[in-house]
Amino acid sequence: MVDVFAVADIVVKHIKTHYPQDVAIVGYYGSYLQGRATERSDLDFFFIPATDRGRKVECQFIIDGISFDFWPIGWDRAERMATSEDWKTTIIADCELLYVRSDNDLARFMELRERISNMGNESNAAAFISKAESAVKECLIGIAKMRLAESSHELTYCRTEAQEIAINIFMCLGFLNQIYYTRSWGHYREQVRNLPIKPDRLDQYLDIIMFSTTPDEIISACEKLTDDTLRLISERQNRLQEIRSYKARMKGYYEEERGMMNKLLTACEKGHYETAFFVAIGVQDGLARMLYAAERGSWPSHVDMGEHREFYVRYGYPDLVALLDPTDFEPLRLAVLQLIEKLENHLKTEGVSLNQFDSVAEFESFYKNRV
């Protein structure tokens, strides 16, 4: 059995002799650190280069059939790991250091660990929800690929795409629970099992993904698992503390958006359906998102499934999109006028001041007296 630590000693001695100012940190992680190494286990070790020259110590090699990869992690990537932008957080959080160039390097490294130790704080919840949304978006892309690809009925293709979806689901659940995984490759399920936030039928869907030989079943399981995870994201988002504020979210919004509303009125008067189509949808959806943000204190989720329309409907704003008709523009034109009046009154009621003037002279007086 290869003495992997003797190998590590050779590497560290070489660094001390030839690259003492070029390598900041050397550490190891994984099976040997966790006490589960086998006779085929390699040593998971890495270094943080301090200079471009320091990157030259990178080396991949095999000794008696055991592979070694002494690979570099730049400080920028180490910081991304500490903030879970790169989800291999365990490398920074749980490694054992074999070499440290200076006290400053050690202090910088320990600062990253301190950041990781605070990842479960509620103050970080919004950031981790956003990361979860990004992960689940990748699932939606994978599902679309499986549905649209010519090879969608090939078992190998479906299993390959489903594996990517499963990994992104694990990432998403880690973010929602504000934890990091200490093991990968076949050990996600055991770590997810005791998490408080996870789909009820997670194991059932994963069993289908892993064991089914029917592509349609695999695709369906991926869709249901992604849908359940989307609902968890929405529920987690709704549990965040809400800070309702129209003044903070909608100051200046109406003055800018009025130009699009005027463009829509002109399109209706001239019977230009293409302009009306795109502008009407943009105005309605944009206002719905702004109202959601003002009421909830946060923007709609990146993977929002239509929930952001809640307050647009609740306050009785006209459905411009439903009124799009290339043969009759008048109902849409009247609805735009209704929306303008309703929005002005709504914002004034919420204490949002509107910069509207009847003349250039009136604007000049206002602008000169701004402080």
Image: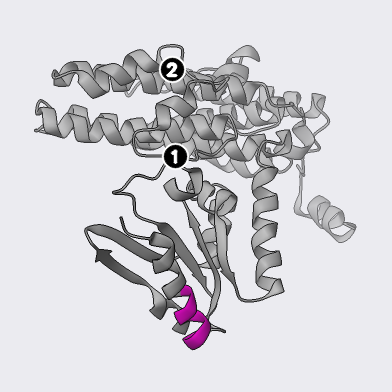
- The region drawn magenta spans 12-19
Q: Which residue is drawn at 9% across and 33% down?
A: 150
Label 1 sits on residue? 183
Q: Residue at x 48, y 46 (%)?
A: 87
Relative image position of residue 275 (x, y in whole percent): 39, 37
Q: Taking 30 as reference, is 273 above or below it? A: above
Q: Which residue is drawn at 68% across and 59% down?
A: 110
Q: Taking 358 as reference, is 297 above or below it? A: above
The kind of residue on which mark 1 rests is Arg
Between 168 and 282, the one lying in front of the other is 168
Between 38 and 270, the one lying in front of the other is 38
Q: Say whether marks 1 and 2 touch (CB < 8 Å).
A: no
In the image, residue 167 lies in the stretch drawn in magenta: no
Crowd class of label 1 (few under 14; some 14 to 19; many from 20; radius 10 Å): some
Relative image position of residue 33 (x, y in whole percent): 50, 49
Characterize the magenta stretch by its predominant secondary structure.
helix
The kind of residue on which mark 2 rests is Asp
Relative image position of residue 170 (x, y in whole percent): 43, 31
Label 2 sits on residue? 228
Relative image position of residue 16 (x, y in whole percent): 53, 82
Q: Which residue is drawn at 65% across and 31% down?
A: 293
- Mark yes or no: residue 54 visible: yes
Mark 1 vs mark 2, foreground winner is 1
Crowd class of label 2 (few under 14; some 14 to 19; many from 20; radius 10 Å): some
| Dot 1: element | loop
| Dot 2: element | helix
- Mark yes or no: residue 52 visible: no
Please tell me the numbered disc located at residue 142: none
Q: Is residue 9 left or right of residue 361?
A: left
Q: Earlier in the sequence, mark 1 or mark 2?
A: 1
Between 303 and 248, the one lying in front of the other is 303
